[in-house]
Image (cartoon, rainbow, N blue to C red):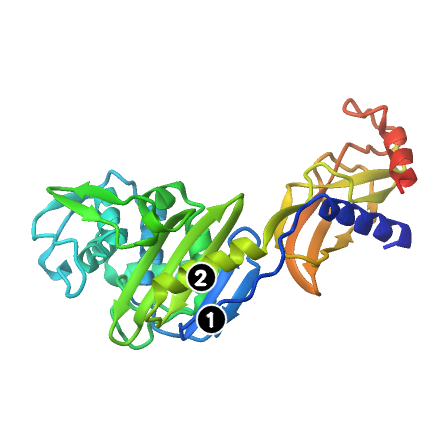
Amino acid sequence: MPWFKRAHCCAALAAVIAFSVVPCCASAPDISAQAFVLMDAESGRVLLSRGETVELPIASTTKIMTAIVALEQCRMDELVTVKREQLREGSSMYLYEGERLSLEELLYGLMLSSGNDAAECIAGSLGGREDFVRAMNRKAFELGITHTAFTNPSGLDEKGHYSCALDMAMLMSYAMEQPAFARIVSTKTACAGERTLYNHNKLLGSLDGCTGGKTGYTGEAGRTLVTYAERDGLRLVAVTLHDGNDWQDHAALYEYGFSTFKRVNVLQRGSSCALAAVRGGNACCVELQPLKNVCIPLCEGEKPELHIDAQFVADAPVRKGQTLGYAIISVNGVELARTALYAACEVNAVGEVNDASEPGLWNRIAEWFSMP
């Protein structure tokens, strides 16, 4: 990449940061969990952690994956009949044999009451328990969570059933992008059949910005907790595993995260990031622009770096919207985000008629090179 392009990219990022008020770094809290992570849901940046990839039992936080697989495979209004073998031990929504409920009602029982019976009923209705568990593990593979394996849909202690704090944070970030899941876990009370269900997540009513989560407990796993909170556009996920002080620890993690980091827009959709030369075209080059805004959490003193990984020479014709590379944002050498760069306009081969050509292209190119 020529020096003048690199300088322009860095100057653009510096300008963005200069107009952003980034909070001062606060002291990291003392967390009692065996393993934990505080992560930015948008970029995946880990803000604070300990033992984040240590594989541990996760108890009923397993049900986050159970809910996602169910939502992606079945209609919410599909009716399910409860079978005797699905009435499992442990936490329950108190189903009874022969009862017919919609998948939506079972999902409320799964996520609010942490019903093991709901988990088994959902799994049994979607291809059977073994097929459902295989689907859970396939989904984990698709999401790139590599320290996770499931052997059941409820989270009861079994050999070979485990995850880690980082994987659970990644899973929760994905899950909260699904509107139905986000709606369910943000609900404090719901009705399912003749019963009223109450959400076990105490932070919904006590922590500013908390919009969802999942509790868990078994003798082997201890207390596990996954929660999600948003303030001023910054969306964070907290995970604690084997933690006897989980409610207070999550509150402390969020206080640290929201007071220390600010969501900063470091690249804007449609902004000029680079130029690519075009061989054999009716224009000599084309602007490369990001497909979307890129936002990352930053604390005081942090300076993001922009690297352009692009095709700086392209052969005509180049179509508007054609992907020609990527913009990569990093902080302290760690990649935090990347987005595709696309051609901002058509560049036809010499002799082609270009109905979509833009007469102001050369002026924009001249302006681009004249930027300080």
Give the residue at x 40% y 72%.
Answer: 33
Q: Position of residue 342 (x, y in %)?
A: 72, 41
Q: Nearer the viewer, residue 209 or 11?
A: 209
User: Mark 2 falls on what kind of element?
Assistant: helix
The dot on residue 185 is none
Residue at disc 1, secondary structure = loop
- Residue 315 position, x and y percent, is 83, 43
| Local crowd size for mark 1, using a 10 Å CA cut-off: few (<14), some (14–19), many (≥20) | few
Out of 347 and 366, give the one closest to the viewer.
Answer: 366
Counting residues from the N terminus, which is met first, the one under dot 2 or under dot 1?
A: 1
Residue 144 seen: no
Which amino acid, mark 1?
Asp
| Vertical relation: 132 (above or below) 147 | above
Give the total of numbered labels.
2
Pointer 1: what residue? 30
Residue 71, image x, y percentages: 34, 47
Looking at the picture, tell me which residue is in the foreground, 339 or 114. Answer: 114
x 69%, y 55%: residue:
329
- Of the 4 image quadrants, the one containing the N terminus is bottom right
Badge 2 crowding class, 10 Å Cα cut-off, few under 14, some 14 to 19, many 20 or more, is: some
Residue 343: horizontal and vertical position, in percent?
Answer: 75, 38
On the rendered structure, is 209 left or right of 116? Answer: right
Residue 110 visible (yes or no): yes
Q: Quadrant of the C terminus?
A: top right
- Kind of residue at badge 2: Ala
Q: Are marks 2 and 1 in contact (CB under 8 Å)?
A: yes
Going 18% across and 41% down the picture, which residue do you hit?
A: 191
Q: CA distance from mark 2 to mark 1?
A: 8 Å
Q: Which residue is mark 2?
A: 252
Residue at 35%, 42% (x, y): give it.
183
